[in-house]
Amino acid sequence: MAQIIDGKKISAEIKEELKEQAAQLKEAGVEGTLAVIQVGDDPASSVYVRNKKKACEYIGIHSRAFELPESVTQDELLKLIADLNADDSVNGILVQLPVPDHIDEKKIINAISPDKDVDGFHPQSVGSLTIGQPGFVSCTPAGIIELLKRSGVEIDGKNCVIAGRSNIVGKPMALLMLRENATVTIAHSHTKNLKEICRQADILIVAIGKKEFITGDYIKEGAVVIDVGIHRDENNKLSGDVKYEEAEKKASMITPVPGGVGPMTIAMLMHNCVEAMTR
Ligand code: GUN
């Protein structure tokens, strides 16, 4: 049976370290403020935003919440971002996604100053990651690297298959695994022989957004399995993109859902906020 990679425990350790760093920065006269912008009142987004504010409070950085109505115009949102970019008391800005259809998500992401882009979504942040220059790294993939390293998983030289190619997870994940000297394959919805390709993986990272799609026969005996998916059924039970009961019989290590990758995203957002304070 696979060893469980405990994201709750590891994220708590990281938050403890960050709290300490934030306290030291405060002693040196450096305070942190994260601006969190939410447009509309999507219930899932409200939960994420609330958790982000709570994490700031825990670490000891200020948060400024901007809860804008669904009807806000793109220009009004761009104006707010421009004001926050110019505000020296703010060192991190995030706009909770998705934004309503009448707002162009790309324009919003591009408007955030790369120096305050704690989500790591700005093209400059992504470009810097691609060519190994300093910049903010997208939180979920950065959290997965922490999960692997802190669980003692050797990445160097390993075959890593990433199922999913989103801008937020799959693509930056591939770049980070490459930076750690893995041999990286990105599989996606057009990939032929997905099962055979996944079965080559020493480390299999799944972010495809399909409930329990990856069954035991996609997994090599002894592989490390990271499940980024999260799905809630009608009884409020959570499950991932991986069929856990089958996967844990094949894998050497596996992340559960909930309590695996999920808690790492906010921990790494806090990491980026502390980094923004030190810049
Ligand atoms: N929506 C879903 N995940 C994220 C995230 O990591 N950051 C932001 N800003 N919005 C999201």
Image (spheres, rainbow, N blue to C red):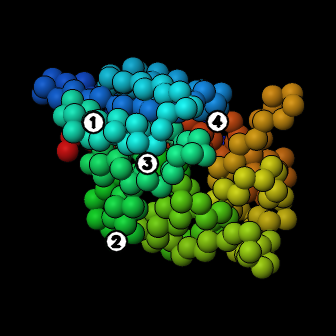
Disc 3 or 4, which lies upstream in sequence? 3
The quadrant holding residue 22 is top left
- Quadrant in the rendering for residue 16: top left
Mark 3 — residue?
A: 108
Dot 1 beta carbon under 8 Å from ligand 1: no
Type of amino acid at the residue the image marks with label 1: Asp
Q: Are marks 2 and 1 in contact (CB under 8 Å)?
A: no
Task: Using the image as rendered, state which of residue 250 and residue 22 is in the foreground.
Answer: 22
Looking at the rendered structure, the secondary structure element under dot 2 is loop
Mark 3 → mark 1, Cα distance in angstroms: 13 Å
Q: Which residue is mark 1?
A: 83
**Mark 2 belongs to which amino acid?**
Ile
Residue 267's spot in the image, x, y percent? 46, 36
Residue at 36 percent across and 58 percent down: it is: 125
Of tags 2 and 4, the one toward the viewer is: 2
Indicate which disc, 2 or 1, sits on the residue closer to the N terminus: 1
Mark 1 residue crowding within 10 angstroms, few (<14) / some (14–19) / many (20+)? few
Helix, strand or loop at label 1? It is helix
Q: Nearer the viewer, mark 2 or mark 3?
A: 3
Q: Could you give the CA–CA distance between mark 1 and mark 4, rounded to whole angstroms? A: 37 Å
In the image, farthest residue toward the left = 28
Kindly identify which numbered label has been placed on residue 59. Answer: none
Residue 216, given in percent of the width and then of the height, sits at 83, 59
